Image: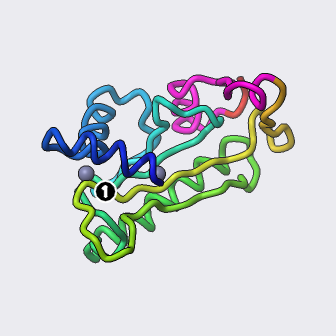
Amino acid sequence: MEQELHRQRLHAAHGDCLLCDYLAVELKVEERIVCQNDDFVVLVPFWAVWPFETIVLPRRHHGALPNLDDDERDSLADILGRLNRRYDDLFATTFPYSMGLHQRPTDGADYPEWHLHGHFYPPLLRSATVRKFMVGYELLAQPQRDITPEEAAQRLRDGTGQQ
Ligand SMILES: [Zn+2]
Ligand SMILES: [Zn+2]
């Protein structure tokens, strides 16, 4: 969270929001988009190291859930449902995952640079039973990519679990 705040602040110093700008780039490139509706976009970020990791981004700049209007609240429920079905379809199983929302800090200060978003980190790699483990070099040095973000996004879009 501290790193994310730091990076968003650095970018905001140039006048724009980091994740608003990043979302605009991803919408233009399209290849890492998993699904979208009127108010939210789900994509595999280019920095993803966890297989089928995704980020959920509101199209409008909001810092926290209470800022969503009624339509956006419904849109969030819709996009989370769609993403869950895509995860379930991938290996034809009830897909496990860790998910969290990153909202602006709640110490009472203003954080205009913070862009609300969610992260999904699922543990499955190749099938309903083959999991991703961080091992060897990954524990001792740095994570290695098992699949590219572009391939992960395409397989989530297409529901194709087999490599
Ligand atoms: Zn923003
Ligand atoms: Zn985050």
Is residue 53 magenta-colored?
no
Residue at numbered disc 1: 114
Q: As shown in the figure, which amino acid type bears the numbered disc 1?
A: Trp
Classify residue 102 by image quadrant.
bottom left
Q: Is residue 61 left or right of residue 42?
A: left
Q: Position of residue 9 (x, y in %)?
A: 28, 47
Question: Of 79 and 105, which appears nearest the observer?
Answer: 105
Q: Residues within 10 Å of mark 1 (few under 14, many from 20)?
A: many
Is residue 147 magenta-colored?
yes
Q: Position of residue 2 (x, y in %)?
A: 45, 52
Q: Is residue 31 left or right of residue 114?
A: right
Q: Position of residue 145 (x, y in %)?
A: 65, 24
Classify residue 161 by image quadrant.
top right
Ligand 1 within 8 Å, label 1 CB:
no
Q: Position of residue 24 (x, y in %)?
A: 25, 37
Residue 96, above or below 66: above
The region drawn magenta spans: 137-160
Residue under the point 61% across and 38% down:
52
Q: Is residue 128 left or right of residue 35?
A: right
Is the C terminus in the top left, top right, bottom left or bottom right quadrant? top right
Residue 28, above or below 129: above
Residue under the point 72% across and 55% down:
96
Residue under the point 53% across and 28% down:
149
